[in-house]
Image: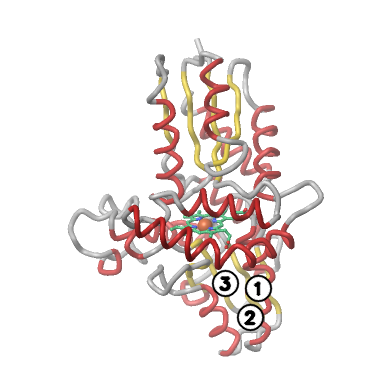
Amino acid sequence: MMKKTAVLLVNLGTPNSPSLKNVRKYLAEFLNDKRVIDLPFLRRKFLVNCIIVPFRVKNSSKIYQKLWTKEGSPLLLYGIKVQELLQERMPKGIDIYLAMRYQNPNISNVLEQIRLKNYNKIIIIPMYPQYASSSTGSTLEKAMAIIKNWYVIPEVTFVSQYFDEEGFIDTIVENAKKFDLNAYEHFLFSYHGLPERQVDKVYNDNVPCKDHYCENKLDETNLFCYKATCYATTRLIAEKLHIPQEKYTVSFQSRLDKNWLTPFSDKVITQKGENGVKNLLVFSPAFTADCLETTIEISDEYAALFQKAGGKKLDVVESLNDAPGWIDTLEKMVKSRL
Ligand SMILES: C=CC1=C(C)c2cc3[nH]c(cc4nc(cc5[nH]c(cc1n2)c(C)c5CCC(=O)O)C(CCC(=O)O)=C4C)c(C)c3C=C
Ligand SMILES: [Fe+2]
């Protein structure tokens, strides 16, 4: 008999509205997470609450106002759509829930709803294909911190990453095929950035990430290194689209300081424009839904940078959003774990 199961999809979260007050609240909750700003307590508190949030909030609120639609933030709207579409594919007794790691729908409240329903099993799927301590690790730690206080703890399954899941790769490939790939001189795979020290901590051999071989090879040593899995996702997409290695670059966006993973997306885009690339197609395979980082940072800000540097057209491959292939992939991921 199939176990009565709750499936919890968790994404990062977004402010409740683009107002200064709500953006400040969101940034403060997000950046005070010790897995996001992984500094000792007092240094983190000072840096986040006295420097990063006060200096960032005005501009962040402005860009969230640009992103906001009549219905709200795209990240949340796509999350709700995915939850509904996935629920339609499920047999009786399998319920799909959506929560956000920060803000709403609040993960503590959603897990409380789940607890009250006495499920035999919970499957937790963070909406991040590549593992990072600041995204997946934080989500799973938070879920465990809540569940550990329950009197009855059912079977719990955590999905840590799916950077190479066939349906995930194929859905990105399908989205890319909506463009005439012969029209682009170069392709950019732009992933959310991370401080280098965060990928260094994955390794047990005291050798920093940059001295491993993450651009070219994935094995048991670097299987949970975000940089290595970003390159692995890229290789799989490029192979299926027959994009040769010299025609693409992997890069990292949204840095807070210079010690984040390189090369930086904005620098690569400027360099490509200056070197005569006229048409550039950008993939963003770290994001399962379009959000501030894709809609504003890539489609607006990077497109303007590219044109200023001499480029003509920068196009962006849509995120997975509510694509049927992505719902098929999640359905398969859930059903194989029931
Ligand atoms: C791949 C997933 C993500 C990782 C890893 C990640 C790490 C990370 N992010 C910041 C700082 C910010 N990120 C912001 C927005 C944002 N980040 C992700 C995903 C990952 N972040 C998403 C999907 C979004 C957009 C959310 C939305 O509402 O659309 C922001 C806020 C925007 C801004 O002010 O620029 C910040 C800040 C750090 C420090 C970090 C790892 C250390
Ligand atoms: Fe982020």
At label 1, the amino acid type is Glu
From the Cβ of disc 2, is ligand 1 less than 8 Å away? Answer: no
Residue count near mark 1 (Cα–Cα under 10 Å), binned few <14, some 14–19, many ≥20? some
Specify the amino acid type for callout 2: Leu
Q: Which residue is mark 1?
A: 301
Look at 57% across and 61% down and name the residue there. Answer: 284
Q: Nearer the viewer, residue 167 or 318?
A: 318
Determine whether the residue tagged by mark 2 lies in a helix, strand or loop: helix
Front: mark 3 or 1: 1
| Residue pointed to by mark 3 | 187
* Residue 70 spot, x, y in % from top left: 81, 50
Tell me: 217 left or right of 24.
left
Report crowding for label 3: few under 14, some 14 to 19, many 20 or more residues within 10 A (C-alpha): many
Q: Nearer the viewer, residue 62 or 323?
A: 62
**Measured Cα–Cα span from mark 3 to mark 1:** 17 Å
Residue 83 position (above or below residue 217):
above
Residues at badges 2 and 1 in contact (C-beta under 8 Å)? yes
**Residue type for callout 3:** Phe
Q: Are marks 3 and 1 in contact (CB under 8 Å)?
A: no
Q: Residue furthest left?
A: 205
- The quadrant where residue 20 appears: bottom right
Q: Secondary structure at mark 1?
A: helix
Q: In this view of the protein, which residue sits in the foreground, 283 or 305?
A: 305
Residue 291, image quadrant: bottom right
Q: Which residue is mark 2?
A: 305
